[in-house]
Each structure stands twice: as C-alpha cells, then as structure tokens.
Amino acid sequence: MLRILGVAFFALVTLPALTSPVRAEDGYDLWLRYRPIEAVAQYRPLATVIVSEGASPSLDAAKAELTRGLSGLLDKPVSAGAVADGAVVIGTPLSSPLIAGLKLPLNTLGNEGYLIRSVALNGHAVTVIAANSDIGVLYGSFAFLRLIQTRQPINRLDIASAPRLKLRLLNHWDNLDGTIERGYAGHSIFDWNKMPDYLDPRYTVMARADASVGINGISVNNVSADVWMLSSMYIGKLAALADVLRPYGIRVYVAARFSAPIELGKLKTADPADPTVQAWWKKEVDSIYRRIPDFGGFVVKANSEGQPGPRDYDRTQAEGANVIADALAPHGGIVFWRAFVYSEKDPTDRAKQAYNEFKPLDGKFRDNVFVQTKNGAIDFQPREPAHPMFGAMPKTNLALEVQITKEYLGQTTHLVYLPVLFKEILDWDTLAKGKGSTVAKVIDGSLEGHDRSAMVGVSNIGDDRNWTGAQFSQADWYGFGRLAWDPSLSADGIAREWLGMTFTNDPAFVNQVVPMMIASREAVVDYMTPLGLHHQFATSHHYGPGPWIDDLARPEWNPVYYNRADAKGLGFDRTPSGSDATAQYAPPLAKLFSGPDIPDRYLLWFQHVAWDHKMRSGRTLWDELVVHYDTGIATVAEMRKAWAVMKPYVDQQRWSQETAFLAIQEKEAQWWRDACIAYFETFSHMPMPAGHAPPPHDLAYYKAIYFPYVPGAAPHKPKDPVE
Ligand code: GCW
C-alpha cells in the first residue's frame, strides 16, 4: 500500500519532468542555474519589473543578476522599469530616493547586510531590497533569488540579514604556472599569462558565485608562495583581475613570501627588525595600493614546510607579522599570518607546536593581523578536535581556516559534504570562558570583544567545466560561504538550499539526498581514520592509505608517528603521561580527553589504547575498529543506492558522473579498510570479529600499490615504472 502511495506521489511530483525532459547539464552554472520554476503563475505577479535608481558597478551587477535570474526562473523577460505592482525595488537610501523615502530600519545592517521587505510604494505592492551599500544590495538580490530558487513564498517578506563574520575569504592555492597545490578540479582558473589584456569571462562567473554566498575576498596564489606574485608585472595583472571582482564586493589578497625583500628587493636580509626591510615592505605595499586601491592584504605561510620566516632571524612570529602589518596599516590592509607552523627540528608532538609558539605571543600582534588557524592542530584530517589555540588567544584576532578542497578526504571522487565538518568545528565549545565559548564566537569576535572577524577556506575551484571536479564538491564551496556569513546555519539546511538550486526542489529528491550528504562525512571518517586516528595517508599526494609508512625524512611526516601501533595497542598518547597535548585545552576538556570518559571519536587522537580495551559498545578496541571501517563502507553503499534511484530527478550527465564517482568511492573505501586492517592486524594479532571478512590480500599487496602521478601534488620524479 505504502509502496503504491509512494509510486503515485512519485508520478505526481515528476510530472513536469515528463512533459519537459530533464535537460543535459554539465554543472557549469553551479547553483545559479535559474531554470524555470514549476509555479511560474504564482511568482510572476510578485516580480514583474526591476526598479533601480542610480548606477554603480555593484548596482549594475545586482540589476543584471536579477534580470538574468528572474527572467530564467519565471520563464519570461523581466527587465528594468518603473514602479508597478510586483516591482522589485533595489537600492540604498543614498542611491535611491524611493528607498530613502521608505525610511527603512537599515542601521543594524552594517555595510554588507540587506533588508528584503514587502511594502506598499506609491500605491503599489512591491518588494524592496535595500541596504546601506551597493554591495549589500547585491547580496540582497542574490538572497531574493535564492528564495525563489528554493520555492519560498515571496509575498510577505521581512528579512534582515547581516554577516556575522566580516572577512569571508577563499585562499586559492594556485601556482603561477597554472597547477594547483591540492587542486582536484583541473588547472588554475587564473590565466596569468594572458592577463592583464585578456580577462577570461569565467572570472566574472566565479565572482558571481562567490558573491552569491557572501565571499568578499580571495587570495589568488599558493601560500607556499612564489615571489613573482609580488613583482610589478604580476601586480599589474592582479590589478586587472581586481577590476573584474570589485563590483562583486571581492577584494584581492596575495600570498606573500617572507623572504621577498631578498629575492625581489635584492636586500641582504629579510630580518623584520632591519630598517631596510621595514622600508622595503612599506615601499612594496605603497606601490601595490597605487595600482589596487582596495587591495586586501597578504596571507603569509612562514617557517612552515620549508618556507622562510622570522625564525630564520631569531625573531618571533609576531615580529614577522608586524613588519608587514605596519606597511599595510595606513591603507587598511590586513595580514593573515598562518599558524600552521611546525619545525623540522623540534621533537615536540607536532600537535602541540603551533600553540606553544603562538600562545606566548598573545597580545603581541598588531590589530590588523589575523592569526589564521586551521580547524585542527594537525592538518585538515577527516576529523580533528578543534585547534587548542581557539579560546587560548584572547588578545589576538583569530581566523579559522578550513580546507574546502578535499586533500585528505578522497580528493575528487569521494562525496563528503564538508559543511558537516565545518559545523562541528564552529560549534565546538572551547569552554574558554565557560560553557558556550564556541569556536564560532571566538572567530566572530564576540567572545573577547574583537571588532575584526574572519573565516578562510582553501578553495576547491579549478578550470574544470563544473568548477570543482565533482558536482557535490560545489556544495562545499557554497556551504563555506553560507557558514562564513552565518555560522549558526545548519548543515542540513544548507544542503537543502543547495540541492534545490543545483538540482531540483522536489521533496522526493531533496529528502533522499540530504541524509546521504549528511551521512557522507561520518562515512569518510569511518573508512579512513576511525576513532581518532589521523594522518594515515600515502606519502606526498595523500591519495589512499599508508599507515605503515615510516621512512620519511621527518618523523612527523610518517603515518606511524600518528598511529603508534604496537604490540600493546593503538593511538597517540597525548595525556599527561604522554605528550600532554591535552593540557593545551581548557581544564575540563583536558580532563575529559585524558580520562576514561573521552568520546570514542577522539579516543586514538589522545590516548594509546590496548587492543583488547573494552569500548562503550562492549567490543574490544580491535573489533570496534573493524566495525567502524565496515560501517564506513556500508554507508557509502547506502549512498550509492540512494543516488541510483534519483535518476528520474537529475539530468543524465550529472547523474551518471556522480554514479561513477560513488562507485569509485565505495571501491576506495574498501581499499582503505583492507589496507589499514592488514597493517594493524600485524600488531593486534587478533581474529576478525564474526561476520567481518579479512582483507582479501596480504599487507605486501597494499604496500605495493603506487601511483606515479596524482593531481594536486607538487611536481616530482616518480619511482621507475614496473611492467
Ligand atoms: O596540508 C598541507 C598540505 C600542503 C599545504 C600545507 C599548508 C600549501 O599537504 O600542500 O601547503 O598543508 O597548509 O600550508
């Protein structure tokens, strides 16, 4: 009966698809597809004409977006005109006498917020999209379109929204030669060779997509920075790019190489205390601002993975950051100084090093410096406890850095919906000032009363036709922007929006695919690094498992450093009897992570646990581990099934690609599980739990798997080929 009902419902909801077959799509249009909606008759009278007084590049962009969006969604031309019933009136009190006359409550919206309201204007029922700035109007226009794209009612609107974080940035890790560090979506979108004379129209499409979710800055080059980016030639190219992005409220930033005073300035030193170095940064920065008056500033990766930095001169991270900050300050520029610092010499647990180095410098950084801190203390793993610096640096502006590109999460083909991970970190309670001291409150400035606030995502954009390599990776870009605007949004809600805009709002589709997206994050944790394991990845490219690797130059590059598998058990002892990294957290957390009540999900991150330790489930650690690996694979199998029956709702091209990718994901989940179990069983010497098959091959087989070339890795010479 239910089945019959189900089928009847199914037939109803897919009726439009039957009359107009689902058009082939390649994902290029992202979530800005603006395909005709089903209920045009309901919406058409509510968006008849666009009224925009005044003109500016941002207002023009807003008008163009509304024209494109409304005409597409409502399947009829909607253009600019005079006030009438159903008009969409956009503007600021400054640009529009009509808006000024309405005396709207805009004072709490700041410079980027917007108000969308249904009002009567000159006797007509209209919708106003009002803001204090033109860019706010653009954001409001995207929000208005989103309402229609997600089929919300638009007849009685009263929406006010302002971003909780002021700087919402993407870091592109693009090299100037067109490759992308950890890029899995083709080559760099930035065609520097042809700039400044040719500006690829894709820059504008990218800017629209960024602006549609509120991203207001991008740094354009790899943080492991090429000094050429600061050269006059490249700044000229960047100025041309900045002109394209400016109407969309996007400022450009550059990843700066700390030793630029030597390489570019031909000085003998880059010592921040040297007056010639200080003068050089000032001169360099002044000249950038002459060409890009709203230049955002610099991102700096210093003393990390071979990059130069202040330590080379026995100076602190703060001294290094401040010399650059001082040069930027007169122009309003910002330094994002990365906290991803660990030393090639320091034998201390790598998870502790950044905190040890930065915590004593709290209060020493200039006000226009953000210490840009990765979500966890190691490196963008499928799961990490929040970085202990959050909550521990009350006098410092901390920016949260997350990775949108999936270096450690299966790269192109694994569907892992990252907003779940982002939320886990944003909602993490540091307990720094009692309960409710979440990471979101640390970074939005509210916990310590900072005026500045920022969140940064390592971009997953490339020149692939669908921008991100996989359709579902678009959701990570989208979700990053939405969460940076409002960290209180739910991962579930964002998934719904994105699916509705990207595929269809049909509830039969959305209700099936949302749970699949939400489950995908725990799945990857389970099949790659369950129970707090981390950094079990193959060398350098991080594609696939390598828990046995122990021969790399630096101890902390080896997976064995992190898993610490031995005859007794598994996991990194970071309790007071081990590295004592737990002490970097607020006392109640330190106690929790060192003791028996530690949540299973962080167990092996913080503790070395006996193979036969009895877990909450009643199973031994060994059995529990195997169960988690298998649960991960089972979840992916469920995801595949869920997607398979979504065929009627999705165009052939996007559906088939994802179908193939999910098959790869399941195969690779199995590989992860088999390889890890094959390795760990050489220590546990325990039998497989009942109902769980042993790995089909021996450990040597998994160790021999080798990939000479993987996208996103630095150029290298592979091993000699085998026949
Ligand atoms: O995760 C590591 C990556 C490096 C990256 C580094 C960083 C840009 O493997 O490719 O370098 O993090 O964040 O600086």
Image (tube, rainbow, N blue to C red):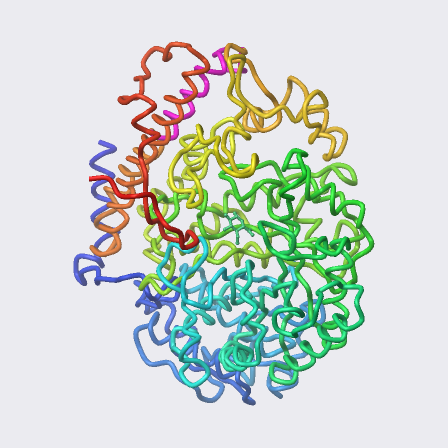
What residue sits 55% from the left and 23% below the top? 571
Q: To which quarter of the image does residue 564 belong?
A: top right
Residue 359 in view in this figure: yes
Question: Could you tell whether 356 is left or right of 233 in the image?
Answer: right
Q: To which quarter of the image does residue 292 belong?
A: bottom right
Q: Report the label total.
A: 0
What residue sits 53% from the left and 16% below the top? 569
Question: Could you tell whether 343 is left or right of 327 in the image?
Answer: left
Depth order, front residue of 248/71: 248
Q: Position of residue 589 (x, y in %)?
A: 71, 30
Q: Position of residue 165 (x, y in %)?
A: 65, 59
In the displayed orientation, state which residue is furthest to the front.
268
Indicate whether residue 244 is drawn in magenta. no
Indicate whether residue 623 is drawn in magenta. yes
Write down the region rendered in magenta: 614-633
- On screen, 420 above or below 104? above
Which quadrant is home to the C terminus?
Answer: top left
Q: Position of residue 194 (x, y in %)?
A: 40, 80
Depth order, front residue of 551/137: 551
- On screen, 509 above or below 620? below
- On screen, 26 above or below 683? below
Which quadrant is home to the N terminus?
Answer: top left
Residue 124 in view in this figure: no
Helix, strand or loop for the magenta stretch, by majority: helix
Depth order, front residue of 696/375: 696
Q: Position of residue 254 (x, y in %)?
A: 58, 68
- On screen, 350 above or below 394? above
